[in-house]
Amino acid sequence: MSAFVIAIVGAESTGKTALAAALQAALAGPQRSVASVPAVIPEYLREFCDAHGRTPLQHEQALIATEQTRRIAAAASTHDIVIADTTALMTAVYSDIVFGDTSLYLTCEAAHARCQLTLLTALDLPWQADGLQRDGPHVREPVDALVRAALGRAGVGYAVVSGQGAARAAAALASVQRALDPPQADQPGSARSKVKWQWHCDRCGESGCERHALLPRG
């Protein structure tokens, strides 16, 4: 991918689409083209559900994941920044939740790892129905746990985005701006884009803590 890809993942009804729209509005400018999937390129799962009047069957999950990855890559080839409202990783998680099928994780984790920044939406928003694509509030905690586990297996650091309204968008934007303009790597001549990141809490020292700051790995 040539663009800086921001992946927004999380359980259903945690504000991913609203967050993607807010980030696109904040980041777009005359010197920088920003695409949002699905705002610019439709999310394939939603398109599939609308076209078929149902959610995908087990054997159709791989197609959903592959097409979502393709659309993100297509947007990345023509824009400076891509904001992906979900990635194939979420297809793998829901395939696990709904069908007990874990076969998609390896491919979807690898695809997600190519994104430059991952934002994980917290479960602090009330659940709302959204047609065929949402199963109910009872699946949010299991989905959140599986997403975190998958990101861990893939070695992908992430920022947990929480808060209400403008505060939620501001928290996400702060993480994005930090990632777009990181401190220089320690090694002379190292490219800024090559700096790897981990999430670190300045209060307790635990990288998995929700209260985090973005720090470069040494």
Image (spheres, helix red, strand yellow):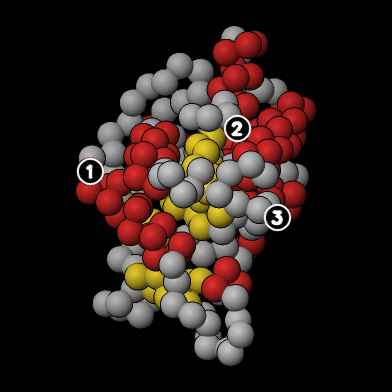
- Spatial CA span between label 3 and label 2: 22 Å
Classed neighbour count for the residue bearing mark 2: other residues with Cα under 10 Å, few (<14), some (14–19), many (≥20): few
Q: Quadrant of residue 82?
A: top right
- Spatial CA span between label 3 and label 1: 32 Å
Residue for badge 1: 166
Q: How many marks?
A: 3
Q: Residue at x 33, y 59 (%)?
A: 174
Residue for badge 3: 110
Q: Which circle, 3 or 1, is nearer the viewer?
A: 1
Amino acid type of the residue that numbered disc 3 sits on in the rendered structure: Ala
Residue 137: x %, y % from top left: 38, 32
- Residue 144 appears in the picture as rendered: no
Badge 3 or badge 2: first in the primary sequence: 2
Classed neighbour count for the residue bearing mark 1: other residues with Cα under 10 Å, few (<14), some (14–19), many (≥20): few
Amino acid type of the residue that numbered disc 2 sits on in the rendered structure: Val
- Spatial CA span between label 1 and label 2: 33 Å
Residue 21: x %, y % from top left: 39, 36
Q: Residue at x 30, y 54 (%)?
A: 171
Q: Residue furthest front?
A: 30
Of residues 178 and 98, the one nearer the viewer is 178
Q: Which mark is residue 98?
A: 2
Q: Which circle, 3 or 2, is nearer the viewer?
A: 3
Residue 139: x %, y % from top left: 45, 36
Badge 3 or badge 1: first in the primary sequence: 3
Q: Which mark is residue 33?
A: none
